[in-house]
Image (tube, rainbow, N blue to C red):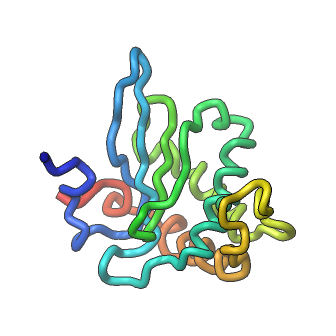
């Protein structure tokens, strides 16, 4: 079988950032998949499952309530390697187009107070696997170390 496009990115040179992972055409519509990379792959610790699960619930809630973007959100979920998330939007976008959306989302996560949305046995398949305090620290770190200091290197995959 052929190696899929996301496995051809050189993960040893990949920095935390916001990348366009791929674009797909479905009928006349383009879908853009973003790679929201939170840690340097194979060089920094990955995100624990409880934290990434909490961020997933918070991020999905944020995106699907966003007045400007909610109609375009197709999917948001964690990478299996636990170094970041995929975000799929309806439309043909570049990384720069979603910088403020992603900053706003991680600001929401980093400052969230109260009960994690959907963290109940009826609403989630593993509702006890949550850690809001550490999730907030992880979100804050991505903001402070990456999202608030984005350069071209954090917006375009390494050659
Ligand atoms: Zn869940």
Residue 132 drawn above or below residue 109: below
Where in the figure is residue 12, as x and y percent of width and height?
22, 73
Left or right relative to 55: residue 149: left
Where in the figure is residue 147, as x and y percent of width and height?
52, 65
Who's the residue at 53% across and 79% down the image? Answer: 48
Question: 65 or 107, which lies in front?
Answer: 65
Left or right relative to 40: residue 101: right
Who's the residue at 18% across and 56% down the image? Answer: 8
Residue 65 drawn above or below residue 83: above
How many numbered discs, if any? 0
Specify the quadrant of the image occupied by residue 33.
Answer: top left
Specify the quadrant of the image occupied by residue 40.
Answer: bottom left
Who's the residue at 72% across and 51% down the image? Answer: 61
Q: Which quarter of the figure is the C terminus placed in? A: bottom left
Determine the residue located farthest toward the left in the rendered image: 1
Question: 128 or 104, which lies in front?
Answer: 128
Residue 30 drawn above or below residue 60: above
Where in the figure is residue 133, as x and y percent of width and height?
72, 81
Ligand 1 placement by image quarter:
bottom right
Residue 16 drawn above or below residue 47: above
Specify the quadrant of the image occupied by residue 131.
Answer: bottom right
Determine the residue located farthest toward the top in the rendered image: 28
Question: 143 or 1, which lies in front?
Answer: 1
Determine the residue located farthest toward the right in the rendered image: 114
Who's the residue at 37% across and 62% down the image? Answer: 154
């Amino acid at each position: 079988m052929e190696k899929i496009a996301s496995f051809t990115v050189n993960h040893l040179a990949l920095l935390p950032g916001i990348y366009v992972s791929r674009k797909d055409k479905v009928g006349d519509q383009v879908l853009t998949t973003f790679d929201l990379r939170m840690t340097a792959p194979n060089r920094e610790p990955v995100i624990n499952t409880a934290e990434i699960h909490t961020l997933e619930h918070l991020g999905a809630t944020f995106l699907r309530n966003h007045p400007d973007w909610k109609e375009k959100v197709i999917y948001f979920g964690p990478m299996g390697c636990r170094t970041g998330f995929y975000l799929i939007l309806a439309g043909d976008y570049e990384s720069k187009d979603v910088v403020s959306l992603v900053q706003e989302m991680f600001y929401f996560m980093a400052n969230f107070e109260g009960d994690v949305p959907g963290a109940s046995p009826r609403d989630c398949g593993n509702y006890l696997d949550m850690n809001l305090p550490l999730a907030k620290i992880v979100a804050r770190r991505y903001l402070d170390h990456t999202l608030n200091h984005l350069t071209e290197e954090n917006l375009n995959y390494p050659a």
